[in-house]
Image: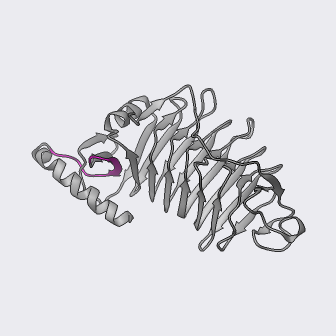
Amino acid sequence: MKKGIAISLAMAMATTMTQALDNFDTVEAGNWTAAGVWPGDGQPDTNSNARLKHDVSINSVVGDTGGLQTGRGAETTLTINSGGFLKLLYGSATIGGNNRGHLVLNGGSLTTANGNVMNIGTKAGFGGSSVTVNSGGLTVDGAIKVGAQDWAILAINGGTVSAAGNLLVGAVGLAASSVDLLGGSLSVDGSLIFGNTTDTLNIENDAVMMLSGDDWADINAGIAAGNITWANGDMVDTAVGLKTWDNGSGSYLHTDFDGSDTTVWVNQTIPEPATLGLIGFAGAVALIIRRRFLI
C-alpha cells in the first residue's frame, strides 16, 4: 500500500499490544528515582501507568514502565536529561492527560515498545501540550499524534525522532497543531497526515526528514495545500535534490528517493538549468553522506 501525505477526516491509530495497567501517581516533584516522588518511596514498574501530577526529571536509566501520562490534574512536565532513559512496554505515552502536559528531551531518550503510540494533547479545552526534543532520542513503536483532542506542538531542535507508524498532525475542527523541525532528524515509517489545511510541518536550518517510500508527489501536494512550509535554509549544505521547491524567500526544499525512502532537507542552493543533468547524481551523493552522518 502506498504510504503518503494526506489531509484526512479519519485519524486511525496503529494497532498496539497493551495490557491492563495500574495507575501510579506522583506524590511530589523531583527526580524519578528520588524517595518521596512516588507512593511508598517505590517506583513505577511494567504494570504501572505512571501519571505525573508534578514536574519530574530523569537523569539515569530507570526501570521499564508500563505507560506514561503527563499533565494529570495539573500542567506538568517530564524532563529527560543526558544519561536518562525511559522505556514504555505496554502502554502509550500520553503527553497532556486531563490537563496540559509536556515532555522535554535534553540529551535523554524515551522509547515505546510493542506498537504503542504517543498522543500529544488529549484533553479538549487544554490546548498547548508539547514535546520538545533538544537532543537525545524519541523512538515510538507506533504512531505519533500531535493534537489528539486539542492543539499541540512537536518541536525538534536536535536529536532524533522516529515513528514506526503514522505522524498525524492536528484533528478536524481543532485549532492548528504543528511539527517544527528546526534541527536533528525526523523519520516516519507510515504516512504523514494533516487534520486541517492550517496544521503544519515546518522544516528549517540543517534538519532532515525521512519518509518511507517515494513521497515527492505527496510532498508537493502538502506544499500546495499549505501544510508543509520551510525557511532559513542551511547555508553550508549545497546539495541539490531530485526535486526542488522554492519558497520565494531564498530557501529551497529538496527531496531525494533512494529506491526505498525519501529524504527531505532545506538549503539556499538554487538548481540552475545547466546543472539539471547532474541533479540526480548530486542528490544521491548527498543522501549517502547524510545517512552516514546520521548513523
Residue 150: quadrant of the picture: top right
Residue 43: quadrant of the picture: bottom right
Give 38 or 106, whichever is nearer the viewer. Answer: 38
Q: Looking at the image, which residue is at 84% across and 65% down?
A: 38
Q: What stretch is highlighted in magenta?
A: 259-272
Q: In this image, 162 relative to 256: left or right? A: right
In which quadrant will I find the C terminus? bottom left
Residue 94: horizontal and vertical position, in percent?
Answer: 69, 48
Residue 67 versus residue 236 in the image, above or below: above
Residue 148: horizontal and vertical position, in percent?
Answer: 64, 38
Q: In this image, 231 relative to 240: left or right? A: right
Residue 235: horizontal and vertical position, in percent?
Answer: 31, 59
Q: Looking at the image, which residue is at 68% across and 35% down?
A: 149
Q: Looking at the image, which residue is at 57% across and 40% down?
A: 14
Q: Does the magenta stretch include residue 86?
A: no
Residue 217: horizontal and vertical position, in percent?
Answer: 32, 34
Residue 278 versus residue 42 in the image, above or below: above
In which quadrant will I find the N terminus? top left
Residue 245: quadrant of the picture: top left
Give 21 or 102, whichever is nearer the viewer. Answer: 21
Q: Can residue 105 be seen in this view?
A: yes
